[in-house]
Image (tube, helix red, strand yellow):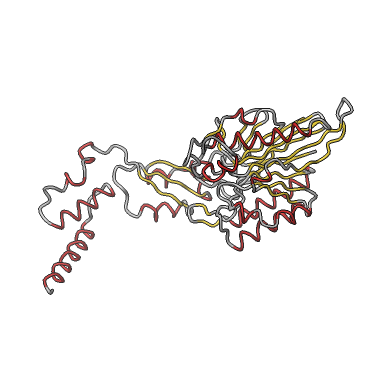
Amino acid sequence: MRLLHTSDWHLGRSFHGVGMLDAQRAFIDQLVAAVERDGIDVVLIAGDVYDRALPGVDVVHLLDDALVRLTAAGAKVVLTSGNHDSAIRLGFASRLLERGGVHLRTRLEDLDKPLLLPLGTDSDGTDAVLALYGIPWLEPRLVAEQLGTESASHFEVTRAATGLIREDIARRAGSAAVHSVVLAHTFASGGISSDSERDLSIGGVGAVPLDLFDGFSYTALGHLHGRQQLSESVRYSGSPLAYSFSESAHRKGAWVVDIGPEGVTSVSEVLWEAPRTLAVLRGSLEDLLADPGHAWAEAAYCHITLTDAQRPARAMERLRTRFPDTLVLAFDPQGVPATTQSSYSRRLAGAPDDLAVCCGFLEHVRGRDADPAEKTALAAALENVRLLEGSR
């Protein structure tokens, strides 16, 4: 049997103000094509299907279309909820959807209720079965009492959840060779995070130890957006698209897991084509505009940090003449004398008049003096204020 492990679709998310629904549709196209091409039997989605608990109508339609197309391609779908999802809303009509091959695991009551699929007979002549379990995002403060844990921490609730799964596996092991696959949306120790993930540490220690997943044939994790292997049997698929510039070096994809009567036989990668390249550039404005080595970034989404000692005028406007999709502009002035870095209040303590205060503020926030036109405009504005105050 062949499984495809994916997660963190974040349908409905934007990228620095740019809508991503078209890019997400393109990812769904690639996913369906991979299912058809590679003979995928089960698609695993380990949480954060939506980016918001209340997704827009067009976003719900996109998920609906994806599920229809995946099942029409011959795959079953096992889907858990993440910390961005509303477990109740995502789990709506779960019993009905199961008849169509979509198996939702969004409730605590379903932790030890696996999807069971036959794997044939192993070398000892024992019937082998694949048991697919889903651990949704567990908010410790909300589920600790129901799970009977000693404290409301990520470790305790995850240990309780995996304990229930192990008990179910043990009950089934007497009649069949059980190979278990567990989906979980959590932050496991050793994982490398990125800027686009929501912090899970509020209410308890965020990371859970990796040994909580010992003994399972494969653990399909969600939450971290970088595709990574934590052990032979524990992996993050990562998000299918980059959702922050910290992911510019990621190669987005998923894991294909082959499993048979003897257990997991191989894990291989499948890669997704990115709709747009991400560029993180740094340098002076003139160098960035002139350097031919940056030609590749002209069609990319750009995060640019300018290092000019003085903040250039019309910096974003000028950058976009070459890099039209500059989405983030930052400043890190280099070579600024230490005397110019004193506090704003100290520098203006001896300002002779209001115009000097205003000009000093401009210099403080952008690293260069007001030019003559700006000084004239500021003087006119101050005079208008003086006249207005005098007429009252």
The image shows residue 31 at horizontal and vertical percentages of 70, 48
Instruction: List the single residue furthest toward the bottom.
Output: 391
User: In terms of depth relative to the viewer, which is nearer, 282 or 209?
Assistant: 209
Of residue 299 and residue 363, the one placed in the foreground of this image is: 363
Q: In x, y percent, where is residue 248?
A: 53, 41
The image position of residue 301, as x and y in percent, is: 51, 49
Quadrant housing the N terminus: top right
The correct choice, above or below, for 256 with respect to 354 in the image is above
The quarter of the image holding the C terminus is bottom left
For the point 50% across and 41% down, which residue is it? 200
Q: Quadrant of residue 262?
A: top right
Measuring 59% from the left and 57% from the top, which residue is drawn there? 21
State the image coordinates of residue 211 (x, y, percent, origin top left): 61, 27
Indicate whether 215 appears above or below 136: above
Q: Name the foreground residue: 368 vs 41.
A: 41
Horizontal side of residue 347 vs 264, given as left or right: left
Residue 46 vs residue 281: left or right? right
121 displayed left or right of 356 = right
The number of discs equals: 0
Residue farthest to the top?
A: 124
**Residue 355, placed above or below residue 233:** below
Name the residue at 63% across, 28% down.
Answer: 231
